[in-house]
Image (tube, helix red, strand yellow):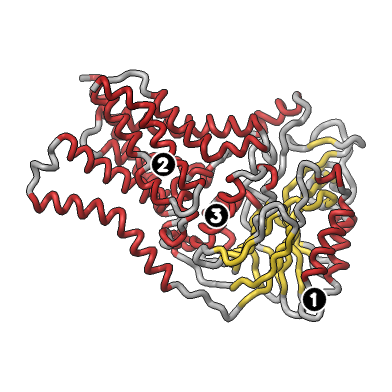
Amino acid sequence: MANYRKLFPVLALSSAVLLSVPYLVPHTGWLILFGFIPLLCMENIAFQTGKKHFFFWHFLTFVLWNAFTTFWVCNATVGGGIFAIVANSLQMSLVFGLFRLGRKVLKGPAPYALLAFLWIAWEKYYLTVAEISWPWLVLGNAFAGNVSLVQWYEFTGVLGGSLWVWAVNLAVFGLMMMVADGTFFTRSPKARCLLLCGVAMTVLCPILVSGHLYYHYQEDEENPLEVVAAQPNFDPYQKFESLSQDQQTSILLSQLSGALDSSEVKKPLLILVPETFTSDVWLNVPWDSQTLRDMRDFLRGYPGATIITGASTHEFWSVNDAGSPRLDRGLYPYVGNTAPSITARRLGSGMWYESHNSAIKVDTTLNLEFYHKSKLVVGTELTPYPKVFCPLDNMLGGVMARDLPQGYAKNLWIEPGVRIAPVICYESVYGEWCRGYVKDGAQALAIITNDAWWGNTPGYRQHLRYACLRAIETRRDVIRCANTGISAIIDQRGNVIDKTSWWQPAVLRGRINLSDRKTHFVLYGDIIGRMSVVFSLLMLLSLVVRLITNKRN
C-alpha cells in the first residue's frame, strides 16, 4: 500500500480534471458523475495505511478544481479571484475533513452518507443565507451544458443534480471497492446482478426521466411577448474615459432605432438595456437623469414599448420634520458630520448617500419602477458584515462598494398586466432567489448583466448556461441582455433559441412565451437542500455522541 501513495498526485489531478471539464466544455456534464472517485480512492488508501496530514491532498484537489474553472475572476480582481479560489477550496476541505473524521467512528456506508448530505447542506447555505456567497461550483451547475439530462430540475432545483452526482459517485466507488477486496465475488449471482443493476439505474433513471420530460414538454404559445435586447458593447474599463454618458445613450438609442419600426410596435414590447448602463440616476430626483428623459422621449415614437434598463443609482439621505436623517427619497438633503448609517458615504458638500445596482422600468409616463439587486458580489458591490468591515474600509479610504439590496424579489409590470422578473447579473446563479420572482407571479425572466469584466474567458459562457438552468427550474422563458454578450433568448426547456456574438454591438429581437404555471420547485422550494440540512445535523450529532462515548471508554 505504501507505493500507492505515489499515485496521490495523479489521483488528485484526475479528480480535479473530471470535476472541472463539465463547467468548461458543453455536453460533458456526465463526467462529474465520476469526478469524486479518484479522490475517494486516494482517501481510502490514506485511511487504510494510516497516512497522516492527508488534508493537503484533498485541499490541493479542490484548489485545482476551483482554479481550473474560476480562474477568470482574477481578470476583474486578482485579490478577489485568489480569495474565492482559496476560501471555497478551504470550505470544501472542511466538509471532506468531517467525512474523514466520521470514518473513524461511523461504520459501513454511514460516513459516505454524511459526506453527501453535508456537502449538499453546505451548498444550500451558500445559495440562501451566506453573507459571503460564491455558489458558482454547486455540483448541479455542472449539467448547465446538458439541459436534456436535467429536465427534472423543475421538481428538485439544482441541488437535485448535486444529489445525483453524489449518488452515482458513491455507488460506483462502492462497487469498485467490493470488486477490489473480493466481497463482490463472494455474493450470489442474483445479488451481484442486483448490485450491478442498482448502480446502472442510479446513472440511467434520471437520464430517462429527463428525456421523457424534454421531448414531451410543450410551451404555451398563445401569450407571446415581443422582446428586444440591446448589446451596446462598451468596454467597462474604458466606459467613461472614451465616451460620456450622453454619447453612450445616443449610441444605444440609435442601435434600437435601427432595429425597430415604429409602425410595427403597437402591441407590448419589452426592451432590455444592460446592467449598470448609466450612473446618473439619483432616486430622490430620478427625472433629473438625462438618460431616463432621453429613454422616455425615445419611447414616444414606439407606442406599446417599455424599457428595463440597468443603472448604478444613488440616494442621498434627507431630513424629516424634526431634522433627523431618513432614507425615503425626500428632497431636502441631510448635511452633517455624523454618518446617518454604517454604509453611508459622504459627498464633498457634506451630504451623505447610499448606492444601489438597479433595474428601472421606463415608459412614456412619469411612473418609474425600481428594483435593486439583492444578491451582491462581495467587494465590488457589497461590504459583508458592515459593522465590522465598513469602519475598516473607511480607514482604507473606501475601497469596497456598499450597494444596498432590495431584500426581496420584486417584479416589474409591463402593460397590460405582464409581470417580468428583473434578474440582475449574479442573481441568475441563485435558483431559490429566481424562484421568488416566479412564486410572486413573474411570467418570464429578464436577465440584465455585464460580463465584460472577465474578458474572453469561460466566465461569461458559464454565466449564460446557468440561465438555462433557471429556465428549467421555473419553466419560464428567459430574455438575457449582456453589455458585451452573450445576449440570448432561452426557452422553458433551457434551450438557447437565439443569441448574439461576444464582444460585438448587436440588437437581439424575438419573442418569448409568457407562463403562469408554477413548477413543483417554485411551489415548494429546495426540498433536497432542506432535507440534507436535517440529515447532516442528525448525523453530526450522532458523530459527536460516538466521539464522546469512545473517549470515555
Question: Which of pointers 3 and 2 indicates the residue nearer the eye?
Answer: 2
Q: Is residue 251 left or right of residue 476?
A: right
Q: Quadrant of the N terminus?
A: top left
Residue 279 in the image: state x and y as whole percent.
82, 49
**Callout 3 environment at 10 Å: few (<14), some (14 to 19), or many (20+)?**
many
Amino acid found under the numbered disc labelled 3: Arg
What residue did someone put label 1 on? Answer: 261
Amino acid found under the numbered disc labelled 2: Leu
In front here: 201 or 474? 201
What residue did someone put label 3 on? Answer: 465
Residue 326 in the image: state x and y as whole percent.
80, 45
Identify the mark nearer the N-term, 3 or 2.
2
Furthest residue toward right: 349
Q: Which mark is residue 474?
A: none
Give the residue at x 38% y 32%.
Answer: 96
User: Tag 2's secondary structure?
Assistant: helix
Q: Is residue 449 left or right of residue 208?
A: right
User: Tag 3's secondary structure?
Assistant: helix
Residue 421 visible in rendering:
no
In front here: 389 or 54? 54
What residue did someone put label 2 on? Answer: 18
Q: What separation in Å lies between label 3 and label 2 (alpha carbons)?
A: 19 Å
User: With respect to residue 133, does 98 lie above or below?
Assistant: above
Residue 472 in the image: state x and y as whole percent.
49, 62
Identify the mark nearer the N-term, 3 or 1.
1
Identify the mark nearer the N-term, 2 or 1.
2
**Callout 1 environment at 10 Å: few (<14), some (14 to 19), or many (20+)?**
few
The picture quadrant where one finds residue 303 is bottom right
